[in-house]
Amino acid sequence: MGKEYNQTGNNIEEALIKMNLGWEQVKGKGTITVSLGEQTHEHLFQMKILRRIFANKIMMTHWAKNLEFLLKSDVKTNLPKL
């Protein structure tokens, strides 16, 4: 099992930046879990993509926006059906 990093922020990008990880510290695939209130979304990343996220600010911003979109879409789809 690998290391677990937890961070909070006003948005997902800020939390990723606060992790202060370098791409060389990523040693394998991993899961990023984001939450908003009681709603959570988990996304599994291969090592190659995780390294890109922590090596490149533009890639980090891109994935932060994607994770925010996925979290919000999970919130909408988990509503009870009438």
Image (spheres, helix red, strand yellow):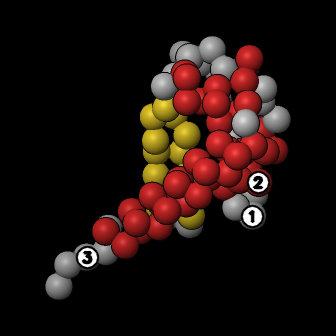
Q: Can the viewer see residue 39?
A: yes
Q: Can the viewer see residue 35?
A: no
In the rendered structure, the answer to whether residue 75 lies left or right of residue 27 reads left
Secondary structure of the residue carrying numbered label 1: loop
Q: Is residue 7 above or below residue 40?
A: above
Q: Which mark is residue 14?
A: 2
Q: Earlier in the sequence, mark 3 or mark 1?
A: 1
Q: Which mark is residue 38?
A: none
Mark 2 crowdedness (10 Å alpha carbons): few <14, some 14-19, many ≥20: some
Q: Which residue is mark 3?
A: 80
- Percent x, y for residue 63? 58, 48
Say which amino acid is labelled 1: Asn
Q: Which mark is residue 10?
A: 1
* Residue sitting at x 46%, y 41%: 43
Query: CB under 8 Å between callouts 3 and 1?
Result: no
Say which amino acid is labelled 3: Pro
Secondary structure of the residue carrying numbered label 3: loop
Mark 1 crowdedness (10 Å alpha carbons): few <14, some 14-19, many ≥20: few
In the rendered structure, the answer to whether residue 70 lies left or right of residue 16 reads left
Quadrant housing residue 3: top right
* Residue sitting at x 61%, y 51%: 62
* Residue sitting at x 73%, y 19%: 25
- Percent x, y for residue 29? 52, 22
